[in-house]
Image: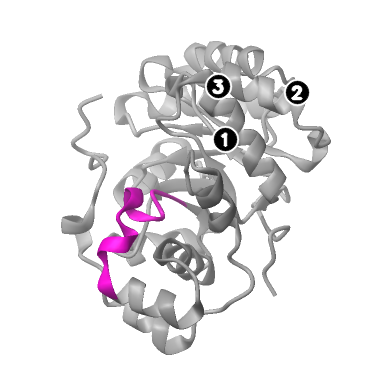
Amino acid sequence: MLDISSTVRLANGVSMPVLGFGTYKIVSPDVVERSVLTAFEAGYRGIDTASVYDNEEAIGRALSACGVPRDELFITSKVWNDEQGEEGVLRAIEGSLKRLGVDRVDLYLVHWPIPRLYESTWRGMERVLADGLTRAIGVCNFLVPHLEELAVRTGAVPMVDQVEHHPWLQQPDLRRYCHDRGIVVQGWGPVMRGRADEEPLLAEIAAAHGVSSAQVALRWALQHGVVVIPKSVTPERIRQNADLFGFELSHDEIAAIDALDRGEAGRLGQHPDRTSF
């Protein structure tokens, strides 16, 4: 039975919370600190950031003030595109660690696929893992062709692939590919960038359970084995998004939400092959 303390085991044995708190586009230091502290008070133990988010220092202050033992927290950061390459990864993680005020993160990710740098970037990722600067490594926004090319060129099987995932963009082929290879899928944008309320079916299912449409979208992902990192700066919504464990979606409800998949038409972020970064 899932609860807020539930974890999933990564390929190297590290345990990762099934629920984390996303911080994308939360930049104001006061808002960052307040939101992260509210998340910890609500029971979140995973925190997701990146060097490019420009909020690691504020998150570091929240980590120092939260009173939660470091070994109970799961901190994720990412190497940005202009930091990739072997030496770039080493410099990038050192910068993130300094800003966060920690001596290691729990998961370090390659933020976007840059095929010409696969070999050198992954060497850097393996080095920071071996040096104990992170407990696990993985990628973000890698689709099946990217994962296949990475494997051919480096032999790498990432421990995590963090991708856009929600009822309008379900990527079942990617989920199956990752499942078959022991790669944990983590979904960003799991409440459709705040648009879950726009989907009538989610609202209907939410009413039946006495929850919100966002909670339904999150619970649906969890029941598909996808780790979620919802983001909010509203204390009530932060707490609500963590309250996912007092209800369960039926098989029919899961199937109905599965039918909402719009494929690429449902993508709300940039396509990994067409990024403008």
Residue at 59% x, 16% y: name it.
57
Estimate the spatial distance between the alpha carbons at disc 1 and disc 3, rounded to whole Å. 8 Å
Find numbered disc 1 in the image and state the secondary structure of the residue it sits on: helix
Circle 1 sits on which residue? 35
Q: Residues within 10 Å of mark 2 (few under 14, many from 20)?
A: some
Q: Is residue 246 left or right of residue 171?
A: right
Q: Name the residue type under label 3.
A: Asp
Residue at 51% x, 54% y: name it.
228
Q: Is residue 93 visible?
A: yes
Q: Is residue 132 visible?
A: no
Q: Earlier in the sequence, mark 2 or mark 1?
A: 1
Relative vertical location of residue 274 with respect to residue 93 in this rendering, above or below: below
Query: Would residue 199 be counted in the magenta stretch?
Result: yes
Estimate the spatial distance between the alpha carbons at disc 2 and disc 1, rounded to whole Å. 14 Å
Circle 3 sits on which residue? 30
Estimate the spatial distance between the alpha carbons at disc 3 and disc 2, rounded to whole Å. 14 Å
Find numbered disc 2 in the image and state the secondary structure of the residue it sits on: helix
Q: Residues within 10 Å of mark 1 (few under 14, many from 20)?
A: many
The quadrant of the image that shows the C terminus is: top left
Magenta part of the protein: which range? 187-200
The quadrant of the image that shows the N terminus is: bottom right
Q: Name the residue type under label 2.
A: Ser
